[in-house]
Amino acid sequence: MKGVYFLISTLAILASATFLVSASDPSPLQDFCVALNDTKSAVEAVFVNGKFCKDPKLANANDFFFSGLQNPRNTQNPLGSNVTAVNVDNLLGLNTLGISLARIDFAPNGLNPPHTHPRATEILVVLEGTLYVGFVTSNGDGNRLFTKVLNKGDVFVFPIGLIHFQLNVGHVNAVAFAGLSSQNPGVITIANAVFGSKPLINPDVLAKAFQVDNNVVDYLQKQFWYDNN
């Protein structure tokens, strides 16, 4: 009898663990759930995973369509890069489907700065140019740095939630496309979040954390932290 109880307990723990470690958006329970940005229609909608859902009978092909990713983006900014995201905010048919896309344009020496996607793993493919890419593991893994130089046709994966970056190390423009395992992966750009938060983080906190003088923190907090998304 003790063996039966142990087996049942073990299965219960494994079932709970499987639920807790789900690494992507919840699976949909219907064919699709086209998001509604017009909350005035909410009385005729169902609220699913962050968005109201359009009546499936009113959905059409345009709800699942986005155009324009073939066009280069303007990279004349402090970072020399531009991210064009295709997620549930501009492709409403992605709601509940657990996937999104981004085009990243780089000028020579352009940088997509260290950032994280709190809700998604990212897989990146280089279409043009040469990129130096990498990610840093968590504290428990010793903050190890994994890097690679990617050329046209190369693919690299950035695990969910880890800090990562891409730098154009070529002498010409570069283009990459990224797939992400969430309809709304989110972006936290490290420098912007730490030194450009609203309101600003107490300088004493940052001076202690980065082990620098308060004047350095004050200087960094006065910079304009550009958002390339």
Image (cartoon, rainbow, N blue to C red):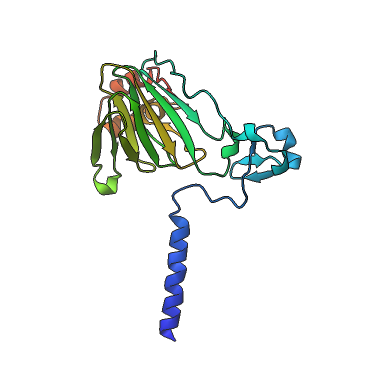
Q: Relative to 70, is 87 above or below? A: below
Count of picture labels: 0
Q: Quadrant of residue 154?
A: top left
Q: Quadrant of residue 146?
A: top left
The quadrant the C terminus occupies is top left
Give 210 or 17, whichever is nearer the viewer: 17
In the picture provided, is 26 more to the left or to the right than 179? right
Residue 190 at x, y percent in the picture:
37, 31
Estimate the x, y position of residue 207 in percent, counting from the top left. 30, 29
Reply above or below: 125 against 20.
above
What residue is rendered at 26% in x and 16% in y? 171
Name the residue nearer the viewer: 53 or 198.
53
| Residue placed furthest toward the top | 76
Query: Where is residue 191 drawn, in percent x and y?
Result: 36, 27
Horizontally, residue 64 falls left or right of residue 197, namely right
Is residue 227 at least partly visible in the picture?
A: yes
Can residue 214 be seen in the rendering of this structure? no
In the image shown, does 167 or 137 lie closer to the viewer?
A: 167
| Residue drawn at point x = 75 percent, y = 41 percent | 44
Residue 202: percent from left, percent from top:
39, 29
In the picture as drawn, the residue positioned furthest to the bottom comes out as 1
**What residue lies at 57% left-to-right and 44% top-to-bottom?**
96
**For the N terminus, which image quadrant?**
bottom left
